[in-house]
Amino acid sequence: MSTLNSAASAGRPVLVTDVLRERIVEGELPPGTPLRDVALSAELGVSRNTLREALRTLHDEGLVVQQLHKGTAVKTLSAEDVTDIYVARRTLELSAVDASPLAPEPLLDAMEAKVAAAELAVDVEAWDKVGTASLRFHQSLVALLGSARLDGFFRVTIAQLRLAFAVMADQGAFQAPWVARDREICDLIRGGRRSSATAALRVYLDDSERTVLDAVRASSRTANSRTNGATSAVKGKR
């Protein structure tokens, strides 16, 4: 679990934001998880004001929702959210493949290391770790663009993706097939076969978007049915 290290007070809201965002990426805070300021501030060793500032940032990033009298909870993404995420993914990831010949070797090595980490996690069926490592691979792909601003943007994007993936009923069945495709894309990039890498990545993103959208819509329908059923039951008792 991500933890907060000691730091100057002025930088603590940023550090708290980073810690909580990383917990989302690692699958530790799934959609709907309540983020209670008293408990979290005590756990992280920061003031409630610092925590609330961090939660406001996460709200602005589309990772949590804040409701009057209900507090803050990790966001459940909508189909519209997913569609928007994939527009951003196509723009950045396909551009990164195009820019890969100019990327320094350490960034290419880091990208390959993320794929290797995902493969190791598949071997031991550690599906949460598989999901995290696969997201890190795509993060390292965007890093080939060499832009700190885009890295910061995509850091939030992979956290949003993890929330979208969380609705999958069978994480193993969902996560495992993508790792082999991550490896294919990585090897094509490293082999200088950019056209093939671009084509493979484009199909990958199309397939991923359809799969995630289907799951998010199905989950939303199930949640709405439960809500409507509970409302009808309450009305029937009146």
Image: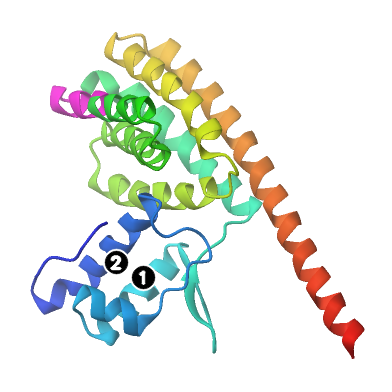
Q: Is residue 93 left or right of residue 136?
A: right
Q: Nearer the viewer, mark 1 or mark 2?
A: 2
In this view of the protein, which residue sits in the foreground, 208 or 36?
36
Q: Which residue is mark 2?
A: 17
Residue 141 location (% of width, % of height):
32, 31
Mark 1 element type: helix
**Cα–Cα span, label 1 and label 2:** 7 Å
Residue 42 location (% of width, % of height):
25, 81
Residue 103 appears anywhere in the view: no
Q: Residue at x 35, y 50 (%)?
A: 26
Q: Which quarter of the figure is the N terminus placed in?
A: bottom left
Cβ atoms under marks 1 and 2 closer than 8 Å: yes
Prevailing secondary structure class for the magenta stretch in the rendered image: helix
Q: Which residue is mark 1?
A: 57
Q: Is residue 79 left or right of residue 24?
A: right
Is residue 137 shown above or below 71? above
Q: Is residue 163 magenta?
A: no
Q: Residue at x 88, y 86 (%)?
A: 237
Residue 13 location (% of width, % of height):
24, 73
User: For residue 7, what is the image quadrant?
Assistant: bottom left
- Neighbour tally class for label 1: few under 14, some 14-19, many 20 plus, Cα within 10 Å: some
- Neighbour tally class for label 2: few under 14, some 14-19, many 20 plus, Cα within 10 Å: many
Q: Is residue 41 left or right of residue 176?
A: left
Q: Is residue 105 magenta?
A: yes
Residue 177 appears anywhere in the view: yes
Q: Residue at x 31, y 73 (%)?
A: 54
The magenta stretch spans which residues? 103-112
Question: Sequence order check: which comes first, mark 1 or mark 2?
Answer: 2
Badge 2 amino acid: Thr
